[in-house]
Amino acid sequence: MIKKFTCIVVDDDEVDMLSIVSFLEDYAFLEITGRYNSSSVALTAAKKSPPDVLFLDIDMPGMNGLQLREQLKDIPACIFITSYPEYALESFEMAALDFLVKPFSHERFARTMERLNEYLTIRQKADLLNHTLGADTIFIKDGPNQVKLHLHEIIYLEALNNYTSIVTPGRKYTVLSTLSNLIKEKAFNNFIRIHRSYAVQKHFIKRISSGEVMVGNIALPVGRSFKDSLAFLKS
């Protein structure tokens, strides 16, 4: 079964509204839960039942689309649809996932939907780092549940752009944090950075060579600029 994400469409022009809704009907991963021609009405509805995605016109009477997004910053994805390209910079400052200028083609809309689907899927699958507990455990948010991990079981960390994989003997978790930020946390002070993409837990290191580190039965590369950080382990 396809995971559906919820969205609302806000546009004061009825023809444009119907056009957007028609385009969205081709994408099974989205469910339209609201259509509004008033930003204030949309704001009340979105506060009561937050959607996953906002499709917002910008130039509207009263509260415009940028101001509406400002009020709904917690909603993960926002796509602005407007007749005025000069709003592009302001829209991306409001954390827009994309910016569509009316009129747009089916091909351009399809590219936006591909990007949106990828973003939402990654976000939905990611196990978000929640908080640390004591000195030797952390909680990982795994979907609706929280999983307690013992820090001493984590073998290594792997950078994935804005995400980091936490690798244990039994499973790989993905958290919404960069590797650089994650290893600054007190809970991860026993990890050592060996590469721009990897940090390993010291007690799992079995062998160090000039080009790689063996952690358990896994060989990980050593970055040139990180070799000095391993020198003390060889002594």
Image (cartoon, helix red, strand yellow):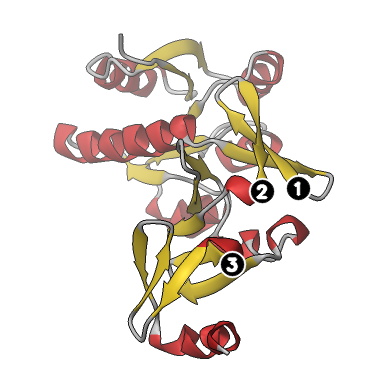
Do residues under tags 2 and 1 come within 8 Å of each other at their CB atoms? yes
User: Which percent across, then down, holds residue 156?
Assistant: 50, 57
Q: Residue 88 is drawn in which quadrant? A: bottom left
The picture places residue 39, in percent across and down from the top left corner, at 62, 25
Please state if 13 lies on the left or on the right of 72 as rendered: left
State the separation of the CA atoms marked 2 and 1: 5 Å
Badge 2: residue crowd in 10 Å (few <14, some 14–19, many ≥20) = some
Split into 4 quadrants, where in the image is the N terminus?
top left
The dot on residue 150 is none
Query: Which residue corresponds to mark 3?
Result: 202
Q: Residue at x 39, y 46 (%)?
A: 99
Q: Earlier in the sequence, mark 2 or mark 1?
A: 1
Provide the secondary structure element on which disc 2 rests: helix
Question: Alpha carbon of mark 3 to alpha carbon of mark 1: how far?
Answer: 15 Å
Task: Determine which quarter of the picture holds residue 214.
Answer: bottom left
Q: Is residue 98 at least partly visible in the picture?
A: yes
* Lower sequence index among marks 2 and 3: 2
Residue 181, percent across and down? Answer: 63, 63
Residue 212 vertical placement versus 142 (above, below): below
Residue at (43% x, 13% y) in the render:
32
In this view of the protein, which residue sits in the foreground, 10 or 26? 26
Return the residue nearer the eye: 194 or 13.
194
In the picture of the structure, the residue carrying the numbered disc 1 is: 136
Residue projecting furthest to the right: 134
Label 1 environment density (alpha carbons within 10 Å; few <14, some 14–19, many ≥20) = few
Sequence-first disc among 3 and 1: 1
Write down the residue under mark 2: 151
Can residue 104 be seen from the camera position used here?
Answer: no
* Looking at the image, residue 23 lies above or below residue 77: above
C-alpha gap between disc 2 and disc 3 = 12 Å
User: Label 3 amino acid?
Assistant: Lys
| Left or right of residue 194, residue 67 in this image | right
